[in-house]
Amino acid sequence: MADTMPPFDDVLPEGLRFRSPAPLVDIGANLTHESFARDREAVIRRARAAGVDTLILTGTDLEHAEQAVGLARDHAGLHATAGIHPHDASQWSPSLEAAMRELHRMPEVVAVGECGLDFNRNFSTPAEQERAFEAQLGLAAESGLPLFLHERDAGRRMRDMLHAWRDDISRAVVHCFTADRETLYGYLDLDLHIGLTGWLCDERRGHHLRELVGAIPLNRLMVETDCPYLLPRNLPAKLKGRRHEPALLPWIVREIAHWRGNTEAELARATTATALAFFGLDGDDTRQALEEGQRHG
Ligand SMILES: [Zn+2]
């Protein structure tokens, strides 16, 4: 059945079907989002057809983290994170902490998070956010897993809290980085990794990032869609609905490569090597996903 399916179906207009010159890792795909409920398998197939062989599925609360683990179990090349997003930090409790600790022991889970601080919207109070974040820093130290971090308008506090834990944490990535130069340098000083989304494809609000991308060393830089959110604005064709998906990651790589002065192949190879090392995945994973993709393609 799946063997006869074309790798790209007709959901993406022809002009958007763009295969990366080298395999990519999408380090932030919210594939458990309800907008993917109807056609998740086709989304995964299109990702592979575009060369996006490895997907790190973001787990933002217990329910979604468990779903992400299930998907990772069923698909080669898919892995999960497990954490509580700062928006949901008010849910934090001893039983939730115990459930997260269990998830972090599973082979499908490759990072603690999405966790962190978001003082932009404060859906949970700053005090609740700090409490949940502090506890998850502890879980990362305990498990040895890297951290998948979310920060918005909370750069200084984030740096202070990470600074206190830095020696106990293996690795940490600030996903969907959108802040200023000072915040970026602060993170790089803490030896953190940086995740970039299609934010910088947005000429209205991504301008400042274009001048900053060159300051991020390639062994610290990773790429992500943060789908279904943040559909890039540099796409050459219209997409029905506004849902972003992993198959569109090569367009983000193209934009970053342009502003960094790299070729797309250089940037793809470097960010993939960085991501596989960061999440502790060896090259076999990508190869396995490729073979799987060819079988299903
Ligand atoms: Zn986030």
Image (spheres, rainbow, N blue to C red):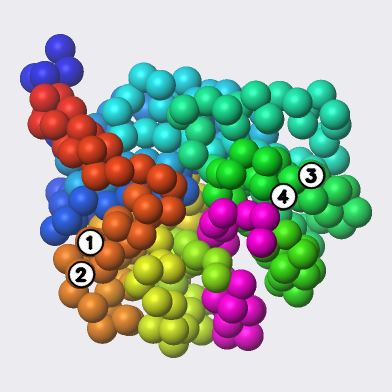
Residue receiving disc 2: 266
Residue at mark 1 to residue at mark 2: CA–CA distance: 5 Å
Task: Name the residue rendered at 67%, 34% in the picture.
Answer: 61
Nearer the N terminus, badge 4 or badge 1?
Answer: 4
In front: 248, or 220? 220
Q: Is residue 34 visible?
A: no
The picture quadrant where one finds residue 288 is: top left
SS label for mark 3: helix
Span shown in magenta? 167-190
Nearer the N terminus, badge 2 or badge 4?
Answer: 4
SS label for mark 2: helix
User: Which quadrant, please, contains the C terminus?
Assistant: top left
* Kind of residue indicated by mark 1: Arg
Look at the picture and state if 110 lies above or below 66: below
Residue at mark 2 to residue at mark 3: CA–CA distance: 38 Å
- Give the crowd class for mark 4: few <14, some 14-19, many >=20 residues within 10 Å: many
Residue at mark 3 to residue at mark 4: CA–CA distance: 5 Å
* Kind of residue indicated by mark 4: Leu
Q: Any magenta on residue 210?
A: no
Task: Name the residue rendered at 41%, 27% in the picture.
Answer: 72
Look at the picture and state if 253 lies above or below 23: below
Where is residue 178? Give x, y as percent. 56, 71
Please say if the residues under marks 2 and 4 sit with CB atoms less than 8 Å apart. Answer: no
Residue receiving disc 4: 137
Nearer the N terminus, badge 3 or badge 1?
Answer: 3
Residue receiving disc 3: 135
Residue receiving disc 1: 269
The picture quadrant where one finds residue 126 is: bottom right
SS label for mark 1: helix
